[in-house]
Image (cartoon, coloured by chain):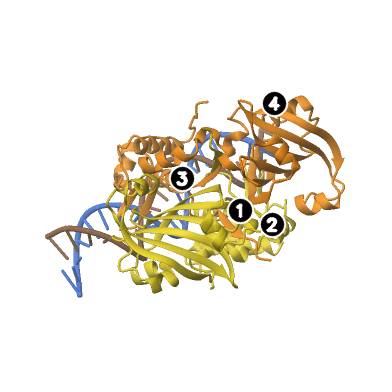
Chain colours: A yellow, B orange, C blue, D brown
Amino acid sequence: MIFIANNKYDVIYEDLKKRIKNEEYKYQDKIPSETNLILEYDCSRNTLRRAIKKLGADGYVQSIRGKGVIVLYNASLENTLIKKGSPSFSQMAERNKIKFKTSVLLFDEIKVNKKLASESTFPIGTPVYYIKRLRSIDDENYIVEENYFMQKVVKDLTISIAEDSIYKYLTEVLNEPIATTKRLLTFGLANKQDEKYLDLNGYNAVPIVTNYSFTNDGTMFEYTVSHHRPDKFIFYDQNDANPVSFMLDN
Amino acid sequence: MIFIANNKYDVIYEDLKKRIKNEEYKYQDKIPSETNLILEYDCSRNTLRRAIKKLGADGYVQSIRGKGVIVLYNASLENTLIKKGSPSFSQMAERNKIKFKTSVLLFDEIKVNKKLASESTFPIGTPVYYIKRLRSIDDENYIVEENYFMQKVVKDLTISIAEDSIYKYLTEVLNEPIATTKRLLTFGLANKQDEKYLDLNGYNAVPIVTNYSFTNDGTMFEYTVSHHRPDKFIFYDQNDANPVSFMLDN
DNA sequence: GCCGATTTGTCCGTATGTATC
DNA sequence: CGATACATACGGACAAATCGG
């Protein structure tokens, strides 16, 4: 899949990113000043700064007032990260890019009961699809997950759609893009289902990702709990602002 | 600690956030249009949009072109998240806000060898402080961590500083703020040190957070590996853009 | 189905403030 | 102190999506 940048600031962002990755600007180098880049890209200051800001948010550069913009991207760091885990296996991108083989273990229509309501925040009585699926690649199982989808949003779901891609069905058929996902990562002792389906490889616990997804118009329509294979799980973030992790303290 | 917003857009951001949290604008409501908010806050469109963008990045709202800006923040979802883990225990904020009791298990000055170089990306031969520390609250141990700090940046470190807060020393004494941290989260089988210090509570594996921190001028000066208590570990993010998680596939 | 009003998205130009050297 | 660099803020123009009449 080729990424097409439609906006001017995205074009500039992609171009600068390419230069950094090609090490035209290396780790700890300064990139050219705003003034020079404005001339080069023939754009306004706002547009250029927007591109720089995005590079910063993605961990490629760091702006320093009065000095310039410095490259943080470090090819050798990137290599050690890639050694630890192949980016081909991005969970963020999983929905639309990676070809998981998906087996549907259970497919049902239920109404939200009190217990499910308290963990999902769906109102009691909401009609939802309840699905259990197994995700695998090359006959190795990586994820066992339970999905709850609001029937009001994800209309006329079938097993064969659930075996393909519900995300694709949502965006391409129902024309309902996913806007935001809030995500919680915890670790839990493996249950019988985990033992049955996942190669635990000596671990007695698994990473658990809880997802709350929102449609473009702000409705929380999905609640999903995924149990991951523990030995190959990696979570990476290069952000400095938002992600917050903490521990239970009860 | 009281947060003081210096900039106009931060003042607007904080005010709108407060209104959302007070449920003046509730989940799925539209907030007033740009035009109205510009009048209310007596600001330019750019300034207002900057505040809105930040609210979006933090997961509070979602903008929809042609329609408006919709509230995603859901008090009841927030409550279920808080039930799972107290935000008082934020790892992001850990460095400066939370009072961990810190015991120094080991304090040494070493030069980076080949093995350390390959996992940290410090150049071979770099002089670093090598520190092992145990973090606890109320006599319960939560984190065992190994730090490597470049001596060129973190000058004249002592055990008593390491027992207090290296972050505070960096910012307040050396006047060297931390700009960015890249973070990797994995799950590994517990070693003898984990068994000795952490209450594993039946788990045979622990969450491992690997940190690469950069100074304001773009130097990677810290490499840290933290082993966390597994039963109470939580990682939360409400972002849709950057964080990427994936699994090893070798 | 079209049109006009409303709303957010993109882009431009300019002025002023602040930090660095 | 002056030159350079990024940060904040203002205002205006046009594009694109949505919605109601």
Of circles 2 and 3, the one toward us is 2
The answer to whether marks 2 and 3 mark residues whose Cβ atoms lie closer than 8 Å is no
Callout 1: SS: strand
Are discs 4 and 1 located on one and the same chain?
no
Q: Which residue is mark 4?
A: B164
Question: Residue D2 sits in which quadrant?
Answer: top right
Distance CA(mark 2)–CA(mark 3): 26 Å
Q: Chain of mark 2?
A: A
Q: Residues within 10 Å of mark 2 (few under 14, many from 20)?
A: some
Residue type (three-letter) at the residue carrying disc 3: Asp
* Residue A125 image position (x, y, % from top left): 27, 51
Distance CA(mark 2)–CA(mark 1): 9 Å
Which sits earlier in the primary sequence, circle 2 or circle 1?
A: 2
Question: Residue A22 sits in which quadrant?
Answer: bottom right
Residue A42 appears in the figure: no
Q: Residues within 10 Å of mark 3 (few under 14, many from 20)?
A: some
Q: Chain of mark 4?
A: B
Distance CA(mark 4)–CA(mark 1): 28 Å
* Residue A219 image position (x, y, % from top left): 33, 53
Q: Which residue is mark 3?
A: B58
Q: Is residue A82 above or below residue B97?
A: below
Question: Residue A88 sits in which quadrant?
Answer: bottom right
Camera-side residue of C19 and A14: A14
Q: Chain of mark 3?
A: B
Q: Which residue is mark 1?
A: A236
The residue at 55%/63% (across/down) is: A197
Position of B135 with respect to A242 (left or right) is: right
Of circles 1 and 3, the one toward us is 1
Q: Which residue is mark 2?
A: A81
